[in-house]
Amino acid sequence: VQLQAYGGGLVQAGDSLRLSCEASGRTSSNYPMGWFRQTPGSEREFVAAISWNTYYADSVKGRFTVSRDNAKNTVYLQMNSLKPEDTGVYYCAIWAGGSHASTTSYNYWGQGTLVTVSS
């Protein structure tokens, strides 16, 4: 399975971005998926996940929305009202089970896409 994340860029505080994560290879359109982000010197942190339900970190709740298009094997992360603290490399991953917020629960990772939010 390969995951390709894209859609990052440089935006100003208050702007929106939509990230996409496309799965290819031996895929199932029903894989639970998650989004994480990481800044230099910090651990990768949970952002959002989607299975039969959706899950969000408190820091993004109400601003970010995770969704999927099974026909396209693609998961999206719509990010609104972006803040400078949202800056980081965003990774998508397949959730293999366990806690949705733990990186150890995910077994395939995309390469990441950089989001930079200027103040």
Image: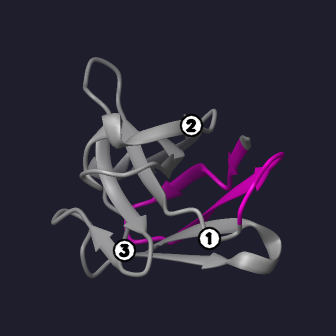
**Vertical placement of 116 versus 62: above or below?**
above
Whichever of callouts 2 and 3 sits on the residue coming sooner in the sequence is: 3
Label 2 SS: strand
Q: Which mark is residue 81?
A: 3
Residue position marked by numbered label 2 in the rendering: 109
Query: In the rendered structure, are the residues bearing label 1 and label 2 in contact, judged by CB atoms less than 8 Å apart?
Result: no
Q: Could you tell whether 26 is left or right of 75 in the image?
A: right
Closest to the observer: 73 or 112?
73
Taking the spot 51% from the left edge, 43% from the top edge, the residue there is: 91
Q: Could you tell whether 46 is left or right of 12 in the image?
A: left
- Mark 2–mark 3 Cα distance, whole angstroms, equals 26 Å
- Type of residue at label 2? Trp
Q: Nearer the viewer, mark 2 or mark 3?
A: 2
Taking the spot 36% from the left edge, 63% from the top edge, the residue there is: 48
Provide residue 83's location: percent of width, then percent of height.
31, 59
Q: Quadrant of residue 51?
A: bottom left
Whichever of callouts 3 and 1 sits on the residue coming sooner in the sequence is: 1
**Vertical placement of 17 versus 116: above or below?**
below
**Vertical placement of 22 versus 50: above or below?**
above
Residue position marked by numbered label 1 in the rendering: 30
Q: Nearer the viewer, mark 1 or mark 2?
A: 1
Magenta-colored span: 3-28
